[in-house]
Amino acid sequence: MKNKLLIIGASGHGKVVADIALKMNKWESISFLDDNQNLKSSMGIDVIGTTKDVHKFIDSHDVIVGIGNNSTREKIQNMLEKLGASIPVLIHPSAIIGNDVEIGIGTVVMAGVVINCCTKIGRGCIINTSATIDHDNIIEDFVHISPGAHLAGTVKVGKGSWLGIGSVVSNNINISSGCILGAGAVVVKDIVEPGTYVGVPVRRI
Ligand SMILES: CC(=O)SCCNC(=O)CCNC(=O)[C@H](O)C(C)(C)COP(=O)(O)OP(=O)(O)OC[C@H]1O[C@@H](n2cnc3c(N)ncnc32)[C@H](O)[C@@H]1OP(=O)(O)O
C-alpha cells in the first residue's frame, strides 16, 4: 500500500469512490485523473492529469478506477495490472462484511452494504449503496450490483454483469456473464444467456 491514492474518473461514481477513500482515512493525499482536460478539480480534489498520465504516478500512488461502466472499468484495470499498479479495495466504514468473504482488487463496497459469510467478490466490482449479498455468493470480476439490490444465498453472477437498482435475485440462482438486469427486476430462475432482462419475474427484452 502507498500513502497516496489516485482515482481514475472524477464524475459521479468517481466522486463516491473518493468519498469512501476520505472516510477510510488511509491515504495522506487523494487525487483524480480524468480525460476531460477542462476539469481541474472535483469535490475539492485536484484532477492532476488524464488516464494516459497514469504511468507517472504508478510508483508513488495506489490507483483505483472510479468509472461505473463495467467494460471501461475492466479495460483500465487490466491496463493498470499490466503496469504493476498497487490497486486497493475500498470499503465504506459502514459496510458489514462477514467472515470468510474474499474481495478482489479494485472492488469498491459502498455505504450500508452487507456481504454475508463465505461470499467471493471478484476484481473491479462495484457493490453499490445498501446492496445486500448473502452467504456463499460468487460475484465474478467487473460486476456492478446497483443500490438496494438484494441477492439471496448461493447466487452466482457472471463476469461483467450489471444488476440494476433494487433488483432481487432468489437463492441458488446463476446469472450468466454479460447480463443487464433492469431496475426492480426479480430473478427466480437461472439466466443462461447474456442479454437485458426486466420485470417481475424477468423477461428478456
Ligand atoms: C448510483 C447509480 O446511479 S447506479 C445505477 C442505477 N441505475 C439503474 O439501475 C438503471 C437500470 N436500467 C434500466 O432499468 C433500463 O431501463 C434498462 C437498462 C433495463 C433498459 O434500458 P434500454 O435498453 O434503454 O431500454 P428502453 O428504455 O428502451 O426500454 C425497453 C422496454 O423495456 C421496458 N423497461 C425498461 N426498463 C424496465 C424496467 N426496469 N422494468 C420494467 N420494464 C422496463 C420499457 O418500458 C420498454 O418497454 P416498451 O417497449 O413496452 O415501451
Image: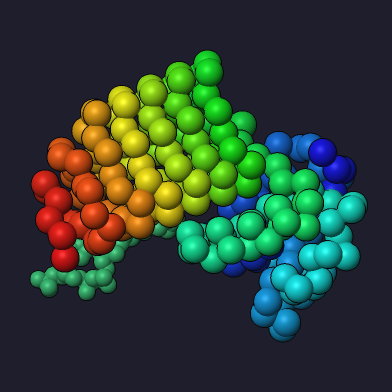
Tell me, yes or no, if residue 16 can be seen here: yes
- Residue 113 versus residue 59 in the image, above or below: above
Could you tell me which residue is drawn at 52 percent across and 24 percent down? 101
Q: Nearer the viewer, residue 83 or 185?
A: 83
Tell me, yes or no, if residue 41 can be seen here: no
Q: Nearer the viewer, residue 102 or 201?
A: 102
Q: Is residue 155 left or right of residue 147?
A: left
Q: Is residue 18 left or right of residue 104?
A: right
State which image quarter holds ligand 1.
bottom left
Q: Quadrant of residue 123?
A: top right
Could you tell me which residue is drawn at 52 percent across and 40 percent down? 122
- Residue 33 versus residue 98 in the image, above or below: below
Instruction: Point out the image quarter for the C terminus.
Output: bottom left
- Taking the view exactly as shown, the residue that stands out farthest to the bottom is 38
Image coordinates of residue 14 in percent, x first then y, are 61, 59
Could you tell me which residue is drawn at 43 percent across and 54 percent down? 160
Q: Is residue 3 left or right of residue 153?
A: right
- Residue 12 versus residue 38 in the image, above or below: above
Question: Count of labels shown?
Answer: 0
Instruction: Point out the image quarter for the N terminus.
Output: top right
Image coordinates of residue 176 in percent, x first then y, are 30, 48
Could you tell me which residue is drawn at 72 percent across and 46 percent down? 87
Q: Nearer the viewer, residue 142 or 112?
A: 142
Image coordinates of residue 28 in percent, x first then y, are 86, 44
